[in-house]
Amino acid sequence: MNNLGNKVIYQIYPKSFYDSNNDGIGDLRGIIEKIDYIKKLNVDFIWFNPFFVSPQNDNGYDIADYKKLILVLEQWMISKNW
């Protein structure tokens, strides 16, 4: 990670990045579906916005529990369709 000034960092806000199932919330499948697009941008790193349990006073940066994923992500992990 030396010389980060020469690297391309692509930020993804999971809840709004890409909604693959039209429920109004971005999802893991949506991120996966766009990986080829991100690769074409020659991205070196992906920065994910927080996705832990939060009272949502500042869009998730006020993390309440660093060991618990937001419910939407928990559903991503147990989904059998992705």
Image: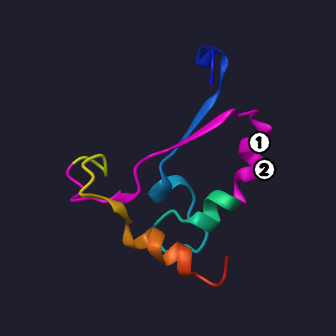
For residue 44, above or below residue 51 = above
- Amino acid at the residue labelled 1: Lys
Disc 1 crowd, CA 10 A, few/some/many (<14, 14-19, 20+): few
- Would you identify the image quadrant in which residue 4 lies? top right
Residue type beneath disc 2: Asp
Residue sitting at x 58%, y 64%: 28
Colour scheme in use: rainbow
Task: Give, as a single range, the part of the protein colored magenta.
Answer: 33-57
The span from disc 1 to disc 2 (Cα, nearest Å) is 5 Å
Q: Which residue is mark 1?
A: 39
Q: Quadrant of the C terminus?
A: bottom right
- SS state under label 2: helix
Q: In the image, is 67 to the left or to the right of 77?
A: left
- Quadrant for residue 18, please give it: bottom right
Residue at the image position 79 percent from the left and 39 percent from the top? 40
**Labelled disc at residue 64:** none
The x and y percentages for residue 7 are 66, 22
Number of numbered discs visible in the structure rendering = 2
Q: Are marks 1 and 2 in contact (CB under 8 Å)?
A: yes
Q: Is residue 44 magenta?
A: yes
Residue 16 in picture, x, y percent from top left: 47, 55
Viewer-proximal residue, 64 or 59?
A: 64
Q: Is residue 18 above or below residue 49?
A: below
Residue drawn at x 54%, y 53% as measured from the top left: 17
Image-based side of 23 in relation to 34, left or right: left
Q: Is residue 8 magenta?
A: no
| Residue linked to disc 2 | 36
State the image coordinates of residue 56 (x, y, percent, origin top left): 24, 56
Is the residue marked by circle 2 packed among few (<14), some (14-19), or many (20+) residues within 10 Å?
A: few
